[in-house]
């Protein structure tokens, strides 16, 4: 029986230091997702990066835009580029992809929830890889997800995944600042373990989230009986290593409640 895994790739894992999309890294992650599918995993991909793509596509705008207008403009342009790149990269493996743009209201109980669930279910049944992102062109202010960590957690619950993998540019949760040599990586987190004292609150410029949102998502999804792994998407073969040699691969793992 195939195992179902939700892989969330954050903006930090997909961008270079100058903020541009790292196509080489993106290609490497596609290679690994293709490997997972070849080894009996059903994969749902939640990918950030649309706004970063769009921001770099358009060097100048006609007038001063507020933050909401910028997000709408850049995400509209960037999502087209992002899904096009994924289409081309997965096509090399003869993998069909489908785009799912969603909003927070689609996760309220009711018809929209069931329709979205049915859509992704039929995609998986027919070998199509769902690529999910928030519909930033219409989701603004209070209607937005906190970030794609929250979105990926909701997707994992909706689709009854076995595992949720949150990929960023850091190996996991540390006992102090990751740059401090005295800090140690926390490898395993049992249910109801409080790590709040170790959670760094700063966010990068590339994404809306940060370790705080990953920790909140991980603890919530852990309670739902789903394994959650926080790992570094910039490490070579990280997804393959998490399957084949998880014990020696740097990451933080939230073991699920029974």
Image (cartoon, rainbow, N blue to C red):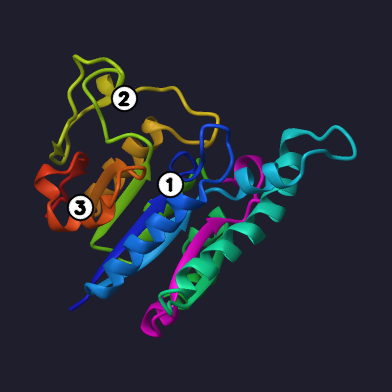
Q: In which quarter of the view is residue 216 placed?
A: top left
Real-space Cα separation, disc 1 to disc 3, in angstroms: 22 Å
User: Image point 56% across, 46% down: which residue?
Assistant: 21
Label located before the other in sequence (3 or 2): 2
Label located before the other in sequence (2 or 1): 1
Q: Where is residue 134 in the image (x, y as percent from the top left)?
A: 56, 54
Q: Do the residues labelled 2 and 1 touch (CB within 8 Å)?
A: no
Q: Position of residue 179 (x, y in %)?
A: 31, 19
Q: Is residue 114 visible?
A: no
Q: Is residue 32 visible?
A: yes
Q: Position of residue 136 (x, y in %)?
A: 64, 51
Magenta residues?
A: 121-144
Real-space Cα separation, disc 2 to disc 1, in angstroms: 17 Å
* Depth check, front residue: 70 or 55: 55
Quadrant of the frame with the N terminus: bottom left
Real-space Cα separation, disc 3 to disc 2, in angstroms: 23 Å
Vertical relation: 54 (above or below) 161: above
Label 3 neighbour load within 10 Å: few <14, some 14-19, many 20+: some
Per the image, the residue denoted by label 3 is: 242
Per the image, the residue denoted by label 1 is: 150
User: Image point 38% across, 31% down: which residue?
Assistant: 212
Quick one: SS at disc 3?
A: helix
* Depth check, front residue: 189 or 25: 25
Per the image, the residue denoted by label 2 is: 199
């Amino acid at each position: 029986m195939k195992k179902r895994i939700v892989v969330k790739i954050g903006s930090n894992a997909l961008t270079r230091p100058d903020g541009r999309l790292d196509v080489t890294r993106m290609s490497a992650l596609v290679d690994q997702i293709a490997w997972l599918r070849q080894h009996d995993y059903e994969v749902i991909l939640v990918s950030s990066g649309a706004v970063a793509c769009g921001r770099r596509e358009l060097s100048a705008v006609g007038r001063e835009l507020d933050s909401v207008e910028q997000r709408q403009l850049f995400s509209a342009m960037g999502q087209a580029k992002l899904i096009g790149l994924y289409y081309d990269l997965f096509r090399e493996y003869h993998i069909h992809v489908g785009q799912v743009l969603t909003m927070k209201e689609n996760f309220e109980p009711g018809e929209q929830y069931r329709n979205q669930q049915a859509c992704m279910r039929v995609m998986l049944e027919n070998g199509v890889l769902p690529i999910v992102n928030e519909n930033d062109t219409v989701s603004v202010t209070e209607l937005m997800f906190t970030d794609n960590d929250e979105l990926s957690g909701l997707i994992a619950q909706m689709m009854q995944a076995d595992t949720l993998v949150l990929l960023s540019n850091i190996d996991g949760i540390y006992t102090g600042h990751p740059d401090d040599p005295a800090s140690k990586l926390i490898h395993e987190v049992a249910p109801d373990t409080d790590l709040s004292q170790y959670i760094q609150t700063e966010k990068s410029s590339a994404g809306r989230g940060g370790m705080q949102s990953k920790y909140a998502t991980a603890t919530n999804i852990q309670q739902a009986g789903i394994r959650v792994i926080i790992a570094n998407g910039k490490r070579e073969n990280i997804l393959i290593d998490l399957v084949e040699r998880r014990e020696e691969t740097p990451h933080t793992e939230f073991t699920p409640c029974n």
